[in-house]
Image (spheres, rainbow, N blue to C red):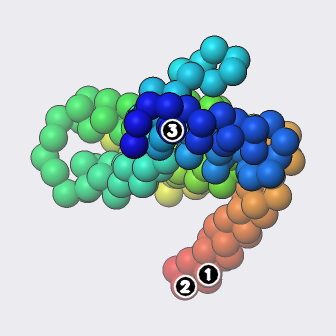
Amino acid sequence: MNKHRKEIIMNEIEYWKKSRLLPEQYCDFLLTLYSEGEHESKNGHKTRKFSMSAWLQYLPFFIMLGLPISFLFVYFTEFNFVLQITIKSLIMGISIILSIVYWKKNRLYLTFFLVFSLLLFFLNTVFLTEYFFGRSAYIIGTVIVFHCVIWYLIGRLSKLTYLRVSGIAALILFIFYLIVTSTIN
């Protein structure tokens, strides 16, 4: 297609966009298609063929692998203790940063990253407790109660119902576990 014809089509698409005859995303797509990725919008921004945020949509799936990987590092490898904690803390740090980034943008990703961060924090804390204090039921129980309270408080402060319910439910299950194990012994 010759350049003049493309320019006419692109001007028509700009008119559609301006008068809202088509959704803005469709117009942007068509403009990028006809300009072969080199379209410059009216506000002076140049659209790119490949958006930097395009790969970010797959990031949660890669981070999702972090929980099983960190679990495998702790329980099924003979890595050094410091290396295990470093890897898990790195994955947890990335997840915390992403939950802060997605706080207002995308509630689904926020939920995923926040729950993922809290679960990794729980695993790290239990692992550190077992390493330093052995398998003391009282200390591990204290850690579990601590995490239940943290989940509840985060849910209450940030108005996330699922965290409040998770904190209360985990605390009730832990108390039930204590009652059952004390009656068996």
Circle 2: element type: helix
Q: Amino acid at mark 2?
A: Ile
**Label 1 vs label 3, nearer the camera:** 3
State the image quarter where residue 166 is shown.
bottom right
Q: Which image quarter holds the N terminus?
A: top left
* Nearest to N terminus: mark 2 or mark 3: 3
Residue lying at 26% horizontally and 29% vertically, measured from the top left: 82
Count the marks.
3
Circle 1: element type: helix
Residue lying at 59% horizontally and 41% vertically, measured from the top left: 9
**Label 2 vs label 1, nearer the camera:** 1
Tell me, for residue 44, which label it has, or none.
none
Single out the residue that lies furthest toward the top.
44
| Rendering coords of residue 139 (x, y %) | 53, 47
* Label 1 sits on residue: 180
* Label 2 sits on residue: 184
Name the side, left or right, on which 97 lies relative to 105.
Answer: left
User: How far is mark 1 from mark 3, CA to CA?
Assistant: 79 Å
Of 84 and 128, nearer the camera is: 84
* Label 3 sits on residue: 5
* Nearest to N terminus: mark 1 or mark 3: 3
Contact between labelled residues 1 and 2, with CB atoms less than 8 Å apart: yes
For label 1, the crowd category at 10 Å Cα-Cα, with few meaning under 14, some 14 to 19 and many 20 or more, is few
| Rendering coords of residue 165 (x, y %) | 78, 63
Can residue 115 be seen in the rendering of this structure? Answer: no
Residue lying at 66% horizontally and 42% vertically, measured from the top left: 13
Of 87 and 61, nearer the camera is: 61
For label 2, the crowd category at 10 Å Cα-Cα, with few meaning under 14, some 14 to 19 and many 20 or more, is few
Residue lying at 56% horizontally and 22% vertically, measured from the top left: 40
